[in-house]
């Protein structure tokens, strides 16, 4: 039996891509997955698949930019299962464009979802984990947290921020029984590039994203971090296509 059997794992942005794939994998290993995103119909369809395969799932409409909604999904996990073993702060958006295009609304959306969303996950989960004396944050960054590419200045800035916040959280929670992992995917099959409205950036990304990892590669990295014994904290995983 997997060590993840019976673990309660909250996943943000579980309606597609990496979050959806992680939810399926974790549920198949016996975890109770508590999944959130804005597109509830997608969550319902995923939940029906998971339950059909014998898994345990709770769905909750979630906009991570709203602190109260993040607190509500953590609260739902806690009241249903009595604990929260892990929170995967995965929700993210990537409407790329060059700075000179001045797509300021899109910059703000990336800041709100990618940075504020992760902070809301921490704000909602940390008090619960401190009280329990255990827990695991898995924050999804990107290879864009390590280097900047043209048209991705703001997106990369948000991911640099996630990396910095995760590092700080790790340092501040050592000794509390709370583990903190940064997972940084390279190009991965998902719906992420569909939010790009800038034609030039879209064309560049179509080419750049041609060689993509399956989302299962990232889900497996998440599982690896979660499966470690409680005294082992996998601090950082970077996953890139090998070919
Ligand atoms: N795919 C890649 O190449 C790649 C590479 C590096 C890092 N990443 C990171 O991986 C994470 C997952 O992305 P993905 O690749 O799986 O893309 P995706 O298929 O577009 O999934 C993004 C998820 O985030 C959710 N989301 C967006 N805004 C939200 C909000 N305000 N509140 C709650 N959920 C929200 C979306 O659901 P709703 O629209 O239903 O809310 C969706 O479930 C992101 O943080 C992304 O930056 C991906």
Image (tube, rainbow, N blue to C red):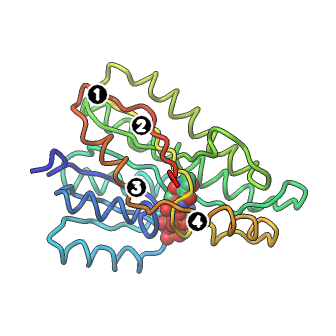
From this viewpoint, is residue 64 visible? no
Name the residue tied to disc 4.
192
Q: How many marks?
A: 4
Camera-near label (3 vs 4) is 3
Q: What separation in Å lies between label 2 and label 3 (alpha carbons)?
A: 16 Å
The relative height of residue 99 versus residue 178 in the rendered view (above or below) is: below
Say whether disc 2 or disc 3 marks the residue closer to the N-terminus.
2
Residue extending farthest to the front is: 243
Residue 56 placement, left or right of 141: left
Q: Find numbered disc 4 in the image and state the secondary structure of the residue it sits on.
A: helix
Say whether disc 3 or disc 4 marks the residue closer to the N-terminus.
4
From this viewpoint, is residue 77 visible? yes
Residue 177 placement, left or right of 212: left
Name the residue tied to disc 1.
232
Residue at (77, 65) in percent of width and height: 201
Camera-near label (2 vs 3) is 3
Name the residue tied to disc 3.
217
Q: What separation in Å lies between label 2 and label 4 (alpha carbons)?
A: 22 Å
Residue 87 placement, left or right of 95: left
Residue at (42, 61) in percent of width and height: 19
């Amino acid at each position: 039996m997997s060590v993840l059997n019976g673990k309660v794992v909250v996943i943000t942005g579980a309606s597609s891509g990496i979050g959806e794939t992680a939810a399926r994998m974790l549920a198949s290993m016996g975890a109770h997955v508590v999944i959130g995103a804005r597109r509830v119909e997608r969550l319902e369809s995923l939940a029906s698949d998971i339950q059909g395969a014998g898994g345990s799932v709770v769905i909750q409409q979630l906009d991570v930019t709203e602190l109260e909604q993040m607190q509500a999904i953590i609260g739902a996990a806690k009241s249903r299962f009595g604990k929260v073993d892990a929170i995967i702060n995965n929700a993210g958006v990537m409407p790329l464009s060059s700075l000179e295009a001045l797509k300021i609304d899109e910059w703000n959306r990336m800041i709100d979802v990618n940075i504020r969303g992760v902070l809301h996950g921490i704000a909602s989960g940390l008090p619960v984990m401190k009280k329990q004396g255990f827990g695991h944050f898995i924050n999804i960054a990107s290879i864009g947290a390590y280097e900047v590419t043209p048209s991705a200045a703001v997106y990369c800035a948000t991911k640099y921020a996630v990396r910095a916040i995760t590092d700080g959280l790790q340092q501040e929670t050592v000794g509390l029984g709370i583990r903190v992992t940064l997972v940084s995917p390279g190009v991965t099959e998902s719906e992420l590039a569909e939010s790009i409205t800038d034609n030039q950036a879209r064309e560049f990304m179509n080419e750049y994203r041609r060689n993509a990892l399956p989302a299962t590669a990232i889900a497996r990295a998440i599982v690896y971090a979660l499966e470690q014994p409680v005294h082992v904290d996998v601090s950082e995983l970077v996953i890139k296509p090998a070919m």
